[in-house]
Amino acid sequence: MAASSLIQPVILAGGSGVRLWPLSRPWRPKPFVRLVGDRTLLQETVDRFAAPQVFAPPLLICNRSHRFLVAEQLQQMEVKPLAIVLEPALRNTAAAATTAALFLAGDNPDALLLLAPSDHTVRDRQGLAEAIALAAPAALQGRIVTFGASPQHAETGYGYIRQGEPLAGCPGCHAIDRFVEKPDLATAQSYLASGGYVWNSGMFLLTARRLVEEMERHEPAIVSACRDALAGAKADEDFLRLDEDAFKAQPSIPFDKAVMERTSDGAVVPIDIGWSDVGSWEALHQVAAKDASGNLVEGAVVAVDSRNSYLRSDTLPVAALGLDGIAVVVSDDAILVCPLDRSQDLRSLVDVLAGDPRYACLVAERSAGGDN
């Protein structure tokens, strides 16, 4: 593949660090934590797109308070990115995607962008590469292609896609009949029972030109704010700092809602690649390597007569007796104990901690030395 036709990975390294507390925090959210294997999720994502014959060097979009985490983890991998663009405020994935497309469109408006969250896991990398190859012809024809994972259960934390008819001339691609962002449990159960629905993986392949066109059609205020933020951006060593006032002058909307729920040009490639967004301790337990009793045991942990549990301690010794379906996670300053099937509700617990003066420091953003 010629250099000009390389796919441009755009790695979205944002997030507030709530759903995998206490290991994930606002100052070190999920992408920057080692949760599966020896690398962080960000490093795994970067390495997933490291084939130089297919992919260009990655463009990373992250919050300015995480800039040194990003730079350090890329340096550990000896990866030189195209750029690290710093967002001065949290404005969700529509802003990040639009910023990336505008940044790239100046040189090549028809560049293929692969929007990829930095906090997901993929077991079958070759399967993902094959799916991207199937998606590329449709994306070059102006489609906005996502990748749909086969649903394993009625999950309320994922978006759902109903597959339509196959696209002519694009084997493996289907039109999108319907795109639904995070339904309630009853709706998710009905989707699972009816068949024909897949989970939205959050990865999208499209040209820079099409992304900007769709955003201008549906959310022109975001395009205007991102364009102004780039116009006022300042280079700072290895980083590009977006203009703060301009960037903040836009709503906070996911790309899924801004475009995918509205567009008539959506397409989906079904995938079966062991994908997960590891959005809870239960989800992480599902993808982790477990012992014969179904336990993930890591760190200073001794488990006796326990099964189907996630048991991890990075500090204090943990002795677990007779547990079933429980998460016990010990960090350097906090301990979480909860049923795995309640871990999707962790945000409510974090909200309680945030409102308690004794424990707010365990969940609040640290600003010292990190915001500038």
Image (spheres, rainbow, N blue to C red):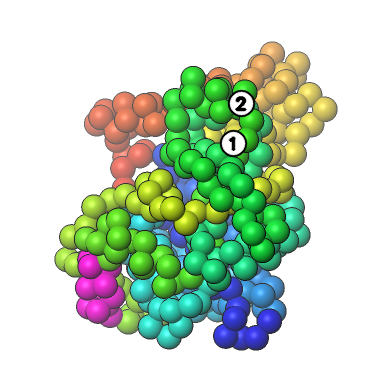
The residue depicted at 62 percent of the width and 74 percent of the height is 55
Q: Is residue 289 magenta?
A: no
Q: Viewed as shown, does residue 366 lie left or right of 301?
A: left
Q: Nearer the viewer, residue 361 or 193?
A: 193
Quadrant housing residue 239: bottom left
233 is within the stretch colored magenta: yes
- Residue 111 visible in the picture: yes
Q: Secondary structure at mark 1?
A: strand
Residue in front for this viewpoint, 165 or 366: 165
- Residue 369 percent location from the top left of the image: 30, 62
Q: Secondary structure at mark 2?
A: helix
Query: What amino acid is labelled 1 in the image?
Result: Tyr
Lateral position of residue 303 relative to residue 207, left or right: right
Q: Is residue 247 left or right of residue 331?
A: left
Rendered view: 164 above or below 140? above
The disc placed on residue 194 is: 2
* Residues under numbered marks 2 and 1 in contact, where contact means CB atoms less than 8 Å apart: yes
Residue beneath the point at 51% across and 62% down? 143
Residue 371 to residue 307: above or below: below
| Above-or-below relation of 341 to 145 | above
Residue at the disc numbered 1: 197
Marks 2/1: CA–CA distance: 8 Å
Residue found farthest to the top:
322
Q: Quadrant of the N terminus?
A: bottom right
Crowd class of label 2 (few under 14; some 14 to 19; many from 20; radius 10 Å) = few
Residue 134 image-quadrant placement: bottom right
Three-letter residue code for mark 2: Ser
Residue 113 visible in the current orientation: no
Where are the magenta residues, as a range? 224-234
Q: x%, y% of residue 39?
A: 64, 56
Placement of the C terminus among the 4 image quadrants: bottom left
